[in-house]
Amino acid sequence: MLRSRRSVLSAIAAGLVVGSLALPTSASALTLGFAQVGAESEWRTANTVSIKEAAKAAGITLKFSDAQQKQENQIKAIRSYIAQKVDVIAFAPVVTTGWDTVLMEAKKAKIPVILTDRSIETKDPSLYVTMIGSDFTEEGQKAAKWLLDNYKTPGDVNIVELQGTVGSAPAIERKKGFEEGIKGEPRFKITRSQTGDFTRAKGKEVMEAFLKTDKNIQVLFAHNDDMAIGAIQAIEAAGMKPGKDIIIVSIDAVKGAFEAMMAGKLNVTVECNPQLGPQLMTVVKEVKAGKEQPKWVKTVEGVFPMETAAKEFPNRKY
């Protein structure tokens, strides 16, 4: 009798354990497929860390891919996520165009798509739910405003520009914003403009070419800090003082930029916050719960001139 009672109790206990294991996981786990641009800069690395950490903290299963800055790799990853029937797909598009076909496939599979960091150009905005990220045009305008407010040396101001990846939203919009910002001041003009592909190595290479062709450069506008840091190396190699002989304005506000500012080699950086992970995970959960989203969730960002670098540096998380 005692043995049979023990057997019954053991069976009930085992059933409770199995039940407790089975119930919550099947009911609550969400899977997110994320297609990242690559690891081309300090900013992008920080963005990846933020997404991975936030997914873990939110209890969301993350399937992550690195496209190595190639659109075809991102499209392949998105198709793989569709085949795996993930709950939500998110990606930071390498370029703005060429997404409609694959996003239509996601829509047919009833998998919602969220854009992070960068926007796309499409005739059908229903192909994605929302975009979480910065106003790149405004970042370009902020860079121009700082320059106009702070560059007081008389005479023509020749500006060379290091653009981001050709066809990418930040490259297109930062250029547009900066040009809009200086157009009312005829002495400020962009004399040379070329892509540095958002990388330090390419930024150095293009700046070297600029300096060989033209020594009459007063300002460098770089679409990100990594290219600016590469350009600083080229300016120093040419026997000039970055931050003094050539004023340097860049965008991102990564730690490397603050180090360059504290060394007196970079004049200002406009913030573009990469820590989009927590915001993304909140939106993923809300989208799956059927909560309506605005078409653009903007991030709030500041401007950091050289004079504030030492004070702000300890607060930087990326």
Image (tube, rainbow, N blue to C red):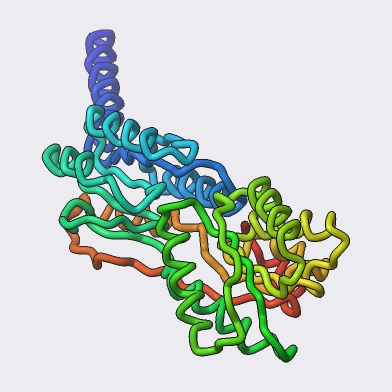
Q: Residue at x 20, y 41 (%)?
A: 101
In the rendering, at what x and y percent does residue 173 appear? Answer: 42, 66
Rendered-image quadrant of the C terminus: bottom right
Q: Residue placed farthest to the front in the image?
A: 213
In the image, is residue 216 above or below residue 95? below
Q: Nearer the viewer, residue 156 or 240?
A: 156
Q: Which of these two is toward me, 248 or 262?
A: 248
Indicate whether 153 appears above or below 244: below
Residue 49, given in percent of the width and then of the height, sits at 54, 46
Drawn side of residue 122 relative to residue 198, left or right: left
Picture coordinates of residue 236, whole percent (x, y):
83, 59
- Image quadrant assignment for residue 43: bottom right
Position of 87 compared to 234: left or right? left
Q: Nearer the viewer, residue 260 or 247?
A: 247
Q: Is residue 61 visible?
A: no
Q: Residue at x 59, y 76 (%)?
A: 303
In the rendered image, which quarter contains the N terminus?
top left
Left or right: where does residue 291 sit relative to residue 163? left
Residue 96 percent coordinates (x, y): 34, 53
Q: Is residue 30 visible?
A: yes
The residue sitting at the right extreme is 239
Find residue 276 and report its image quarter. bottom left
* Quarter occupied by residue 226: bottom right
